[in-house]
Image (spheres, rainbow, N blue to C red):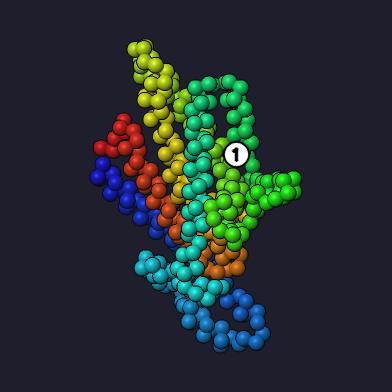
Amino acid sequence: MLAYTVRRFLFSVAVLFLASVTIFVLVNLGYDPLADLRQNPRISGEDIQRIAAIYGLDRPLHERYVIWITDFVRGDFGYSVNNQSPVAEVIGPRVWPTVLLMGTSLIFTVIVAVPFGIYSAIKKYSTLDNVGTFLSFVGYSMPSFWLGLILQLLLGVYLTAWAGTRIFYTSGMSSGEGGLVDLLQHLTLPVLTLSAISIAAYSRFQRSAMLEVLSADYLRTARAKGLSRRRVYLKHALRNALIPIVTLIALDMGALLGGAIITETVFAWPGLGFLLADALYKGDYNVAQALLMISAILIVFFNFVADIAYSLVDPRISYS
């Protein structure tokens, strides 16, 4: 187990190195931070060269990469050109909104999808199972931005007009009133948008895993011994059937930032995804590089945790 953990850790470091090179090259070849200055006739070529020297943009690409990754490891993410402040100060206030949104969405997804997937497997081909299968395919095929806009229209506009009072807000994180009710009114629609696709995927995986476990020989033996259906399902089947969900949860937590970009942009949610979309649009390359690298670290880290967690969830798995 220790040898496997060490090998898996070294592999993760190699993946992060390749990810950092890819992110740095793509961002720096895709953006010219001095493009606006070059188009300004009042700024001379000498001024542009002096500004490029200040930001280190006159150096070869490989030297700039070494400087960037060294500073990144030390916690120095550079300077935001658009916000005129260190990148860490720009990112810091955006962390909590994203954690709140993604954490609530993940909890809501697990609470809905896991029991429904288990029920669908136990009551295979029942009316509710067929309806759930249809809704899962519908939910999985809907783009997040389209679903977000539909929810804004139906629950944010039409429902407000019908009820005569605001029930759900369609943008932002607060209306200035504060309090839990105000937060939930802003949080509901983004959470529903993010959860729709995940609920569809989780419930299908949970249903397939449960069906596979229910057909295993050891469960037939348990039934033959006269154990109750409740004990067979909860004690013997559920633990092994939860293993695919562990993988999905780990991957979703790692893709936390990437999955938030569209939803946070549609609902103007002031999180990291909204900040990344804004940085990519405005060419704020230091902010974009830092957020993409943080996203890569989260993905690699939670994949690493998922691999290690397998041996804890399923004792049949051995890394020896």
Taking 94 as reference, is 174 left or right? Answer: right
Q: At x 45% / y 37%, what residue is drawn?
A: 245
Element at label 1: helix
Q: Nearer the viewer, residue 113 or 43?
A: 113
Above or below, 79 relative to 319: below
Q: Nearer the viewer, residue 308 or 172?
A: 172
| Quadrant housing the C terminus | top left
Above or below, 227 relative to 132: above
Count how many numbered circles sit on residues in the image. Answer: 1
Q: At x 56% / y 53%, what residue is drawn?
A: 183
Residue at numbered disc 1: 140
| Quadrant housing the N terminus | top left
Q: At x 53% / y 68%, what residue is drawn?
A: 285
Taking 34 as reference, is 296 left or right? Answer: left
**Residue 288 screen position, x and y as percent:** 52, 64
Task: Report if residue 24 is visible in the image.
Answer: no
**Residue 236 screen position, x and y as percent:** 37, 24
**Residue 97 screen position, x and y as percent:** 51, 57
Taking 216 as reference, is 104 left or right? Answer: right
Q: Around disc 1, counting alpha carbons within 10 Å, would you say few (fewer than 14), some (14 to 19), or many (20 or more)? A: some
Above or below, 195 relative to 298: above
Q: What residue type is labelled 1?
A: Tyr
Q: Which of 255 and 320 is in front in this view?
A: 255
Q: Quadrant of residue 130?
A: top right
**Residue 13 screen position, x and y as percent:** 35, 55
Task: Report if residue 211 is visible in the image.
Answer: yes
Q: At x 57% / y 47%, what residue is drawn?
A: 191
Above or below, 232 relative to 89: above
